[in-house]
Image: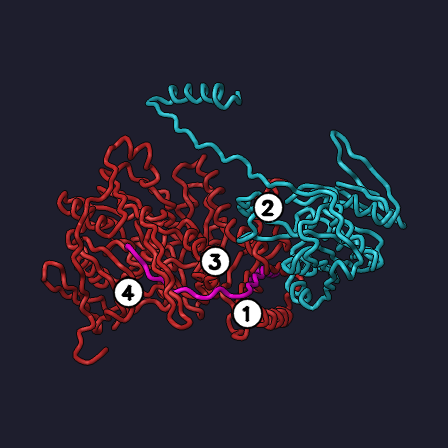
Amino acid sequence: MRKGQVMNLIKTMPLAASPCPAVRDPAEIRDRHTPMLTDESRLQADSVKTIYFPRSVEEIAGAFQELREGGMTCVISGGRTGITGGAVPIGAHAVISMERMKGISALDREGERFFVRAEAGVTLKELEEELARRAREGGPALWFPVDPTERSAQLGGMAATNASGPRTYLHGSTREWIRGLAMVLPDGSLLKVRRGDVQAEGLLFRIAGVDGVSRDILLPDTAMPRVKNAAGYFIRPGMDLVDLLVGSEGTLGIIAEIEFRLEEKPEATLGILIGTKDEEAALDLVEAARKAKDIPLQAIEYFDPDSIRLLNERKREEGNGSALPEFPFHGGAAVYLEMAGPEPMMEAAGGRLESLLLSLGIPADRTWAARDERDLERQKLFRHAVPETVNAWIGRRKQAYPDLHKVGTDFAVPDSALRKMFSLYRRGLREKGLQSVVFGHIGNNHVHVNVLPRNMEEMEEAGELYLKWAHAAVSLGGSVSGEHGIGRLKKDLLKIQHPPDVLEAMRLLRKAFDPAGILAPGVLF
Amino acid sequence: MNIVVCVKQVPDTETLIKVKPDGSGIVEDGIKWVMNPYDEYGVEEALKWKEKQGGDVTIISLGPARIMETIRTALAMGADKGILIDDPSLSGADAFTTATALAAAIKTIPYDVIFCGQRAIDDDSGQVGAVLAELLGIPSVTIITKAEVADKAVKVLRPIEGAQLSIQSPLPCVITCQKGLNEPRYASLPGIMKAKKKPVDIKNAAALGITVDMKAKVVKTIPPPARPPGKIIEGEEPAQKAAALVKLLREEAKVI
């Protein structure tokens, strides 16, 4: 901090509110806009009074003005790919859809660093296509390496939930790639902030409202788990304001525009699926691969033997027409490793990986390696097929038990607790005799245990295990939510993560941004 | 046994194909190039034969420098070496010219059997295998789903309407491969690492002593007609909407 300068003051600008395009006809909302009432969580709202479709920050301010005057509440709707229900307008009067905010700025180049500003409604797919188009027209070949799985996710939603993915292992989550953002606050003002502009003084921010009144925002005094984490607000003494706004799940304001940092696309990518004889051998491989600093891995993913069995069963059921790639190594677990970089580096690292496998007694021909785009896509198809297949399985069980649902964990723990967490998972599943698949981001000690309950009793048992594991993850220094966020469905878990006084401080923080409680009622707490 | 596989690089079926405004071909910008899927069966079959019989597998392809990627893919699967025929005069080659170039390259090496895909998914001409056999003066067995080698001869199965033909041919011969012949393997890590070091010869038309003599020319590439816009059926009651749908299907779409 420079001397004599107030760095922790959050300054906002007034916006000239303009009327926001909206749909208010109940029949039209029912017939044409039903997707707005739900998201990937499958939670469902009955209806809303209004769906706003702003095209600018001024129109967002216009929507807020209406909401304030009418004493109404709203949720923000992006690509609706979230699975904890943050975009579902349960208990809210209105939806603000970001789908018409589609602008992408020209590239900003600062030395070797590239930045692009994109409006919240741009999807990840649209950003990638635009970057590819510009590269074809002679621009630099750039990418946003975080790679959250779902390409229809909107950038605003990705920022609001701090989305992550397999490559978070090396590249971090969305937060690390955001340089700045523009957020419209519920009072209709605009908060434009870049990294370095506003930093907490210890745990203190001050916010200067458009009403001319400044209020203190005291952050809760708590240590964030030092793992991949999407549970509640991100807090750290002396933190940058950008880090607070990212991952705030639509409870502080509407992210209208995001400035992303981009990187030059690596020359080559190598994806390797490795069959191991069992889970133990896979864990050995993961730990050895993490230690091998001369192998620059950007993703380490896991598929337990049940995941592989489930996929191969599906492949058999689908028969000849199945688009699902066959996993060539039966009867064991699998680890997916991915690295990217200049061709000579890939060559050297590939050789070192071969030696590593050899030293672990894993036959190097029990690998499926991909280096061209199509083979990498095939591997991706295979990897993504696990959760899809689980959902289809649950869908079938639902016919017998309509209230049955998947019980899936999202806990992340520190490196040192990986084996401990696995043995807790395995013991619990074994004792209860539950069917499951375990897969996911093992590089970040963040696997998804998906219990497949066959009936309601099993679902109840799975629910008990789930809470037990959540407590265990927190006591091991972990997070109750590595990536899914809290939304509406995981509020009980946030209470396991943080003691009541911390949650109370988070509530006050939220209130400082949204005194009237307009945004996302029922989300987070 | 000396096994040759002819492969072609084609646009991935997932790629959105755009026709150039003047109809002279497709826009190649942004296309994802892959090995023709029928040729993958050829590579897999060659590797299986090699595993049983011993010998080596040579991959031959024709086209610009980007074709090297496709040859490397086959080498990563386990093939031993490659030949790339790269000559600007061969750009837009028809089936006859392609077969002529392939035949000239194949004549420079020993061969006992030649695998081709039964057709390429881009131009669907399906002629190169047969013309190649003709130019080399050897038999061809086409569109086969099973091949067994025994004693300087090959027994193949070819599905036809309602039956299968069991055909025997002496070796050497050209075999064109159909879906169902096998399940192409994935490359392994050692496969990919070794592929970079395997030899690929690059030859031009002069080195092969061929002169281009096109028999066929693509006059124009015409995109399929744009899909007509969808129609939303309005109405209050499901029964009423269903009736409207039936009416449209019968009178407008003429499908029922």
The numbered disc on residue B25 is 2
Chain part drawn in magenta? A256-280
On screen, residue B129 versus residue A480, left or right, reads right
Task: Single out the mark in the foreground, 3 or 1.
Answer: 3
Q: What's the distance in space between the residues labelled 2 and 3, CA to CA?
A: 20 Å
Task: Single out the mark in the foreground, 2 or 1.
Answer: 2
Q: Label 1's element?
A: loop
- Where does the image place residue B112, in percent across and percent down from the top left? 85, 53
Choose the circle earlier in sequence order: 3 or 4: 3
Choose the circle earlier in sequence order: 1 or 4: 4
Q: What's the distance in space between the residues labelled 4 and 2, CA to CA?
A: 49 Å
Q: Which chain is red?
A: A
Q: Residue at x 37, y 50 (%)?
A: A82
Task: Classify mark 1: residues with Cα within 10 Å, few (<14), some (14-19) or many (20+).
Answer: few
Q: Label 4's element?
A: helix
Choose the circle earlier in sequence order: 3 or 1: 3
